[in-house]
């Protein structure tokens, strides 16, 4: 159930002139930034068509009525940059995509080509992270998936105190970028998070990933008690999980809410359903709050899954992303901005090679 929030709860507006950064074209006009208004919906849909053609995988953004309803219900929040004419020149979003309803994803951001380097993207992000979220206390944490076909969004979110925790390999199809021809193959993303309301809790580290996870958690902007996972999966406990398939992206996501004694067979059945839909990427999220998460990781690694990274607050408590590819990983095409994300990719590549080698 979506979080209810009255439209335009944050009523402040940022006025930005195009000399904030050097514009590409001198005819850039000033723009303003604020939260969604119902008459923005048509302009948002037109902006997505302008940038992505008909290939953006979240189809909601092509339907003005759906955009308006999602903002009204609190499933999406659109932060818009508007030219003086009222034209939408840029937008960034928050939306619910994780099991935890206090964790929002920041993404689906874009700017008209002629307004790039005008400051529009940074202005919408600044409003989103530093004004909108602090004034909406039901939003306790954010994460973002910054694409890796270029470094710009990774650099942008780093300036807003997001911490990299995971990399999703081959997540987005190249078709999503065909309008601007900015990707030759599938595109990875760097996952980064930002905490607004602390949630200290105990998590369990799979032994095989203990050292890497400790490095990641040393950088986190919240507190965790770290304990090595040594427990066996309870035989009498049943597994609970939800499968979601994104047909256009050819991605399946399995959120495991409980690991039980039937986990091996339960997961195999869900994976079979995903493969029947011709997916190329299968992602599994496990709860790091379960003492036997290490045993579940071992089962997944036997089935070809490799490390993705922790997902703070994913289930309210933290999750761990494991991933499996039925396509080339294209590691050499992944563009990363920070030294830490480059080190993280090296670890992921090594784990992928180890898992592949034992298959």
Image (cartoon, rainbow, N blue to C red):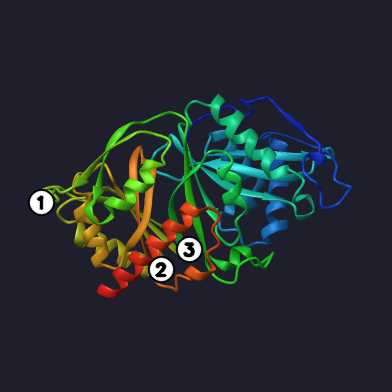
Horizontal and vertical percent for residue 319? 34, 46
Pick the front one: 111 or 26: 26
- Residue in the foreground of this view, choosing between 279 and 310: 310
**Label 3 close to label 2 by CB (< 8 Å):** yes
Left or right, 216 with reference to 87: left
Q: Is residue 232 above or below residue 16?
A: below
- Tell me if mark 2 has few (under 14), some (14-19) or many (20+) residues whose alpha carbon lies within 10 angstroms of its own: some
Q: Residue at x 55, y 31 (%)?
A: 133
Q: Residue at x 82, y 52 (%)?
A: 24
- In the figure, 122 relative to 173: above or below? above
Q: CA distance from mark 3 to mark 2?
A: 8 Å
Q: Which mark is on residue 235?
A: 1
Residue at image mark 2: 277
Secondary structure under badge 1? loop
Local packing at callout 3 (Cα closer than 10 Å; few below 14, some 14-19, many 20+) is: few
Q: Secondary structure at mark 3?
A: loop
Question: Which residue position is annotated with label 3?
Answer: 247
Q: Give residue 344's position: percent from left, percent from top.
A: 42, 56
Q: Nearer the viewer, mark 1 or mark 3?
A: 1
Whether residue 284 is visible to the viewer of this picture, yes or no, is: yes
Residue 7 is left or right of residue 252, and the answer is: right
Tag 2's secondary structure? loop
- Picture layout, residue 183 above or below residue 50: below
Query: In which quadrant of the rendered view does residue 270 lie?
Result: bottom left
């Amino acid at each position: 159930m979506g979080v209810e929030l009255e439209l335009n709860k944050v009523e402040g507006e940022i006025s930005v002139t195009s000399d904030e950064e050097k514009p590409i074209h001198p005819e850039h006009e000033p723009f303003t930034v604020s939260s969604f208004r119902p008459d923005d919906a048509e302009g948002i849909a037109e902006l997505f068509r302008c940038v992505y053609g008909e290939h953006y995988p979240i189809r909601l953004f092509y339907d003005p009525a759906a955009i308006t309803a999602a903002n009204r219900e609190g499933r999406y929040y659109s932060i818009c940059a508007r030219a003086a004419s009222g034209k939408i020149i840029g937008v960034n979003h928050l939306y619910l995509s994780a099991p935890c309803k206090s964790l929002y994803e920041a993404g689906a951001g874009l700017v008209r080509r002629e307004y790039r380097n005008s400051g529009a993207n940074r202005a919408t992000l600044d409003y989103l992270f530093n004004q909108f979220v602090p004034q909406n206390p039901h939003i306790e944490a954010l994460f973002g998936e910054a694409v890796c076909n270029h470094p710009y969004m990774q650099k942008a979110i780093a300036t807003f105190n997001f911490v990299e925790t995971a990399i999703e390999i081959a997540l987005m199809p190249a078709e999503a970028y065909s309008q601007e021809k900015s990707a030759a193959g599938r595109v990875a993303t760097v996952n980064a998070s930002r905490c607004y309301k602390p949630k200290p809790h105990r998590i369990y580290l799979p032994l095989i990933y203990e050292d890497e996870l400790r490095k990641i958690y040393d950088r986190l902007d919240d507190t965790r008690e770290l304990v090595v996972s040594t427990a066996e999966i309870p035989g009498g406990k049943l597994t609970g999980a939800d499968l979601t398939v994104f047909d256009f992206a050819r991605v399946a996501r399995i959120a495991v809410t409980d690991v039980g004694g039937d986990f091996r067979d339960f997961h195999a059945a869900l994976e079979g359903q995903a493969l029947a839909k011709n997916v190329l990427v299968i992602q599994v999220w496990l709860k790091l709050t379960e003492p036997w998460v290490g045993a579940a990781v071992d089962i997944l690694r036997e089935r070809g899954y490799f490390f993705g990274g922790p997902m703070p607050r994913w289930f309210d408590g933290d999750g761990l992303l494991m991933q499996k590819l039925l396509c080339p990983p294209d590691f050499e095409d992944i563009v990363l901005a920070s030294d830490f994300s480059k080190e993280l990719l090296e670890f992921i590549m090594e784990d992928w090679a180890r898992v592949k080698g034992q298959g």
